[in-house]
Image (spheres, coloured by chain):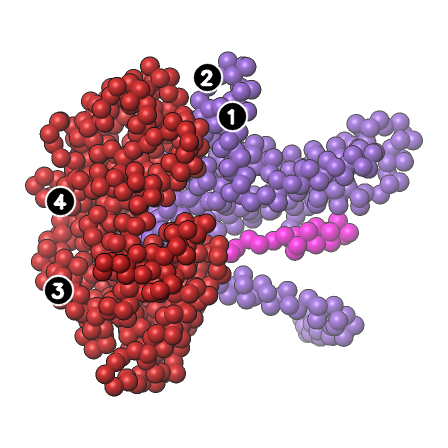
Amino acid sequence: MQKRKRVLMIALATVMILSLTACSKTEKETSSGTTVKLTEGTIYPLECDDELTYWAQLDTNLSTQVSNFGETELAKELEKRTGVKITYIHPAQGQQTEQFNLLVASGKLPDIIQYSWYGFGAQSAIDNGYILKLNDVLEKWAPNLSQLLAENDQYDRMVKTDEGSYYVFPFFRGDKKDCIYSGPVVRKDWLDQLGMEIPVTIEDWDTMLRRFKDELNVDIPLSARLNHLYSMFGGAYGVSQTYVLNDQGKVVYGPAEDSFKDFVTLLNGWYKDGLLDVNIANVDAKTLETYVLNDRLGATLCSAAGELGKWIKAKAGTDFEMVGVPYPVLNAGERPRLSTREWEYNPSSSCAISAQCKNPELAARFLDYAYGEEGKMLYNFGIEGLTYTIEDGNPVFTELLTKSEAGLSIALKQYAMGSYSGPFVQDSRVVEQMQAEPPQVRAAVLTWDDTDAEKYLMPLITETSDEQKEMSKLASELNTYSEEMMIKFVVGAESLENFEEYQKQLQDFGVDRALEIKEQALERYYARN
Amino acid sequence: MDKYAEQSVSVRLKKNKIYLLEAELKKNWLLYLMFLPIVVYYLLFAYKPMYGALIAFQDYEPMKGMAGSDWVGFRHFIDFFTNYYFWRILKNTVVISVSTIIFGFPAPIILALLLNEVTNSKFKRVVQTISYIPHFISMVVICGMIKVFTADNGIIMDVLCLFGVERQPLLNNASAFVPIYVISDIWQGVGWGTIIYLAALTNIDQSLYEAATIDGANRWQQTLHVTLPGIEPTIVIMLILRLGSILGIGYEKIILLYSPLTYDTADVISSFVYRRGLQELDWSYSTAVGLFNSVINFAFLILANAISRRVSETSLW
């Protein structure tokens, strides 16, 4: 009896057998907000008693300085100028996806949500009542953004769905050069030591890596984060980790292409000869940095200011010299096809207005401020006289920022979004000044930018809800399998003789159907007007 | 005649029972009051959400709610069962789980028994503290340490090299994943796991040891015939509960340690769901897999309990 009792006690203390997620539907609030009163002539500051909530990931650097975006100088200035009171809500660092997931599942949405609604499925988000279709909203209350989209067809096409619905106040990069911020780098001082030129073709790379290894005893001639390996050498073979356009403008799935075999064969050869990092499957940013700072690494792919600039500064005073080099091509005279370039429209930093927003006019007018003349300057450069002055018609950052300990790009984050991202148009003059120091950084970006990536990069197509459902099943098998086989081919865990079988398996998974869906979506994309 | 008598007896018994219950409540109402929040907790957080499991049979859209979402029957289950990787992730989940039970389950018991034999209390406390530490270190840090230790120039490789193993990053080797997972799991949990057994050990009647000594039992025999039977119910209950989460390998440690090179042995149900569900917001699919998990776990729990009740008289119910 006593035994039984004790047993029961232990059991009660520890049992937690079934735990299933709770999902309850909350009622929508439908009460409408008070109207916005406009001052005669000028729009801002607005007079309205309503307050808005704004959900967004807080920038990592900012999160070490403030606990809430509302504490930044930018937020205070915005409130002063627009007259709109905003409560900012942030997901915990690194848990954006999970917390967005919970937010959406809770059925109670804040007024403004900054998240990749493109990735979520913009049209279905509108149809299912998560966010507002913005067509009327933009027309009535967002003159600045409307004008911007009317004047720029390319922007306009990117930010709407196939059905022609607008869904966000977008983040645009102001210039093509600002769409790329990472690329291949090599140790220039070692090249000089060997009397070699900057490598251009795959063959050049092969020679360089071998000579690094044989003549300079470089520990790891080549290493990179796994997905960057595709970006670095895939372009030469016209393949990438997922979908790209081929020379004819048709959609192809990189890992299923015949030339993918050449790509993995190349890497496999390098791996066997000790040119490619043995740890290649587990390389992360930290690993790379350790390699570089300890002079163990010959070449890799890294980001401009965040890594290349940082490393050059950290190794100042030594022989260390690292430069950006062009994306490799197969034959001399070709132009690089692919790079890490992104599109001008960046979905994840763009803001939608939730369907539950009580005062869409207020939210729209607040967000539209960023696209006007005054707003552009504030979002990009901060406050005139304090963070920047105009010299020869161009804004130049003051010493408050340039001489600050944290460095320009981090110091600016208190006053403006120019050095990261948000719902506004990034001015390339910010990017230029950020990449000015050390000078190798800007030079690298200009080198990396010189590709035909625009022609091959998959446009920001959208799938219908039904297509999306079908794709998610297809993609889960295709991506897992191809990633797994790619690395196995590279390290030799799977013989290259099995490449045809691998391709056959991708066929069985339905790669053709996936391509068909992508192709249809691409046609609809081009048909947008 | 007899029939009526029986009936009236049973009625009386029933009345008796209700009466007893009333008396019990009156007598111990304070205890029951204290117990009430626990009941509410379980009703609210363990039983009410079970209703939410219904979305496994829907194409759930939060904005439409459960009433408005479309019913799709067993489609998500069929999707899961017919997935190319279904058998692999099921196998990996079971292999990792069973290995953790076989090697990991006895570890805290052995450590607890050893600690119990230690007479120097200072030494005992130091050992306990040190063995608890890994439990309090965040999983991310632990996995970072494991990565460093198992790298091609890590300490573990240094040792293995002495035995003629070729220098390589161990985590790239699919066949090394399960051992790494299980051994590090023991390292992480062994100290913490001893607590419940040490508590059980203090409950053993000291006079039993005296009696055993008088009968001429040495230390080893005492452990075998007094200590172990003394904590046997605890061991059995812990084992039953552990079997109840046989498919419950968490994804955190897995996704921090695996890479496409080791998917063959490392990809488990939860990491698969993480990739598919969390990143693509597929609520219904994730719930379907979760429900499948729970059903299997529940079956194991029942089974283990039934076996245990027959064999050792110890059971949950």
Q: Are marks 3 and 4 on the same chain?
A: yes
Query: What separation in Å lies between label 4 and label 2 (alpha carbons)?
Result: 46 Å
Kindly identify which numbered label has been placed on residue B166.
2
Q: Chain of mark 3?
A: A
Residue A344 on image: x %, y %: 22, 53
Query: What separation in Å lies between label 3 and label 1 (alpha carbons)?
Result: 59 Å
Residue A132 on image: x %, y %: 27, 71
Counting other residues with Cα less than 10 Å from the Cα at mark 1, is it few (<14), some (14-19), or many (20 or more)?
some
Query: What separation in Å lies between label 2 and label 1 (alpha carbons)?
Result: 13 Å
Of badges 3 and 4, nearer the viewer stands 3
Residue range in magenta is A1-19
Residue holding disc 1: B154
- Badge 2 amino acid: Glu
- Left/right placement of residue B247 relative to residue A35 reads right
Determine the colour of chain A. red
- Is the magenta region chiefly helix, strand or loop? helix
- Badge 4 amino acid: Lys
Seen at 89% across and 40% down, the residue is B207
Determine the colour of chain B. purple
Query: What separation in Å lies between label 4 and label 1 (alpha carbons)?
Result: 45 Å
